[in-house]
């Protein structure tokens, strides 16, 4: 018999939702435990050797025991990338915090009380806590200047979004200000990013919160006075149980929905979870392309990954567009891949899509992605194009065997969005005197890859419409809450983390008031 340790609140996951929940509940005087499946990554300890696949990839198809930083999945309808580590997605995101336009919340799938105005105080909280500010105008960034010139010629508005980065001064001993090395999405070795483990969660720990890394949660069951969280200690393989008078699921969209599905349909410990669980998945319209052979030196590896956002919110389907850039070695590898165009053979590889997991591991392990595959003529004139749009949020999440899956005919259902994005990317490339093509995986498999999974446990006014109440509490299961991207009922069309964080701040208030 495994003995359970009891807390006032058990939080599952340490990303934006989990860390925010932990701090606010610790500030309310509650004992808090945070269970995180990944390990800690202090500045300077993020993996950089791409041939070490087990350090990079999380429980990938070729080695289920691996516990790396990136969880990459090729699901039936979409590819997803998430993080595994104390701090969650904040470890590898592009630092961008955007307050979406009010029109986003006018979609009828949002509860009536969840408006842009209602979220404004929570946006303010996040901005203060993460010390958000845009890239200083004084920084000379050719890639930013070229992007703004192009947008001006296209008649498109741009803005420099607030970012969770210390630009000119170290925010704490042992950390440095931004080194302009374009490694934001690889884990900041310098501690310039104000990630959740160094901000919200660190403050929660200072108030007594217990963080338990390498704890993989399987399911949740009700017990007298609260809930029991079942987990596996990945360091020892032992079963662990932790109890809380309240439980907050913040394991990210994929993790939280999987835990709820296992609890309802496998362990059958939460049988009354809404039938809407798993419905309404969105990849936030993420769509990738490449731009190569620009006529000017963009210095793409100087600065943060993203400095400026271009808006296409004047008509539907709406989206935003950025040039996403990485450090010089990665940019040279990407440039060396060229820009293959499959023409009439687009979609030919679709039946093999879900086989890409093992192939990715083998390619990394053999060093195929550690150096350019071909000659690199103009890496300084190359960058990725990344659009974030309002897809129809119609993916369906479920358990396929023992693993989570997402089924979605994205290409057909979002053809208008893809067409408008592709037209914009092509027009942008022409402003650079460059060439554009969609990501080769899109051409070959007709599946998108997203870093912004949303939905599946929607906020709603009734269990017939969604999974959690407007306070974030799971319908029919008092004291069980969800606070992460899974509660978001639509695509955002902007970088979504500010909305997720504001939602977590609002839900944390409800959890604290429930005692």
Image (cartoon, rainbow, N blue to C red):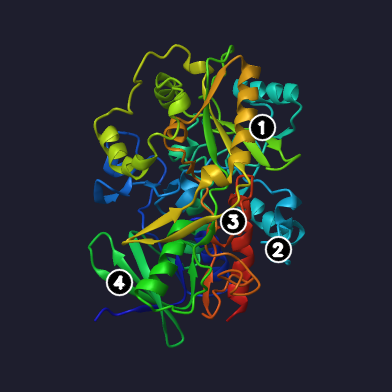
Can you say which quadrant of the picture contains the C terminus?
Answer: bottom right
Residue 281 x %, y %? 53, 56
Residue at 51% in and 60% down: 19
- Give the number of the mark in front: 3 or 4: 3
Tag nearer the camera, 2 or 4? 2
Residue 114: numbered disc:
2
Say which of marks 1 and 2 sits in front. Answer: 2
Q: Choose mark 1 or mark 4, whichever is in front.
A: 4
* Crowd class of label 1 (few under 14; some 14 to 19; many from 20; radius 10 Å): few
- Image disc number at residue 240: 4
Label 4 secondary element = strand
Label 1 and label 2: CA atoms lie apart by 32 Å
Circle 3 sits on which residue? 500
> Earlier along the polypeptide chain: callout 3 or callout 2?
2
Q: Quadrant of residue 214?
A: bottom left
**Residue at disc 3, secondary structure:** helix
Crowd around label 3: few <14 · some 14–19 · many ≥20 (10 Å) = many
Q: Which residue is mark 1?
A: 136
Q: Horizontal placement of 512 versus 344: left or right?
A: right
Q: Residues within 10 Å of mark 2 (few under 14, many from 20)?
A: some
For the point 44% across and 20% down, the residue is: 335
């Amino acid at each position: 018999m495994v003995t359970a340790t009891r807390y006032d609140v058990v939080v599952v996951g340490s990303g934006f939702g989990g860390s925010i929940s932990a701090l606010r509940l610790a500030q309310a005087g509650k004992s808090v435990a945070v269970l995180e499946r990944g390990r800690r990554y202090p500045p300077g300890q993020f993996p950089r050797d791409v041939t070490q696949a087990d350090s990079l990839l999380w429980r990938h198809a070729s080695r289920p025991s691996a516990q790396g930083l990136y969880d990459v999945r090729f699901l039936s309808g979409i590819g997803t990338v998430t993080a595994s580590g104390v701090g969650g997605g904040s470890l590898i995101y592009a630092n961008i915090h955007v307050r979406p336009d009010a029109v986003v919340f006018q979609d009828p799938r949002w509860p009536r009380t969840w408006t842009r105005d209602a979220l404004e105080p929570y946006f303010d909280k996040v901005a203060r806590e993460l010390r958000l500010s845009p890239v200083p105008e004084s920084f000379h960034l050719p890639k930013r200047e070229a992007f703004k010139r192009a947008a001006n010629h296209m008649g498109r508005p741009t803005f420099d979004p607030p970012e969770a980065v210390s630009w000119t001064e170290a925010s704490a001993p042992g950390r440095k200000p931004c080194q302009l090395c374009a490694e934001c999405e690889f884990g900041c070795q310098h501690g310039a990013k104000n990630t959740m483990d160094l901000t919200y969660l660190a403050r929660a720990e200072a108030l007594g919160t217990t963080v338990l890394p390498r704890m993989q949660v399987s399911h949740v069951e009700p017990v007298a006075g609260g809930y029991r969280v079942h987990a596996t200690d990945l360091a020892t393989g032992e079963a662990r149980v932790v109890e809380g008078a309240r439980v907050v699921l913040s394991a990210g969209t994929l993790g939280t929905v999987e835990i709820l599905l296992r609890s309802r349909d496998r362990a059958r410990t939460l049988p009354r979870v809404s039938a809407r669980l798993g419905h309404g998945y969105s990849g936030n319209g993420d769509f990738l392309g490449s731009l190569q052979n620009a006529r000017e030196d963009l210095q793409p590896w100087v600065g943060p990954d993203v400095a400026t956002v271009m808006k296409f919110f004047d008509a539907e389907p709406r989206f935003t567009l950025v040039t996403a850039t990485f450090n010089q070695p990665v940019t040279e590898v990407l440039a060396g891949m060229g820009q293959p165009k499959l023409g009439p053979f687009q979609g030919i590889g679709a039946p093999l899509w879900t086989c890409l997991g093992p192939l990715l591991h083998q390619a990394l392990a053999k060093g195929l992605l550690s150096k350019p595959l071909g000659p690199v003529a103009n890496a300084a004139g190359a960058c990725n194009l990344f659009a974030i749009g309002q897809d129809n949020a119609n993916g369906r999440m479920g358990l396929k065997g023992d693993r989570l899956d997402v089924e979605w005919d994205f290409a057909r259902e979002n053809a208008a969005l893809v067409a408008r994005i592709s037209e914009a990317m092509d027009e942008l490339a022409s402003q650079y005197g460059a060439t554009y093509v969609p990501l080769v995986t899109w051409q070959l498999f007709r599946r998108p890859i997203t870093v912004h999974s949303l939905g599946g446990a929607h906020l709603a006014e009734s269990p017939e419409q969604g999974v959690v109440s407007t306070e974030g509490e799971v319908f029919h299961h008092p004291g069980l809450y969800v606070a992460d991207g899974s509660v978001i009922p639509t695509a955002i069309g902007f970088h979504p983390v500010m909305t997720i964080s504001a939602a977590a701040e609002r839900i944390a208030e409800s959890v604290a008031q429930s005692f």
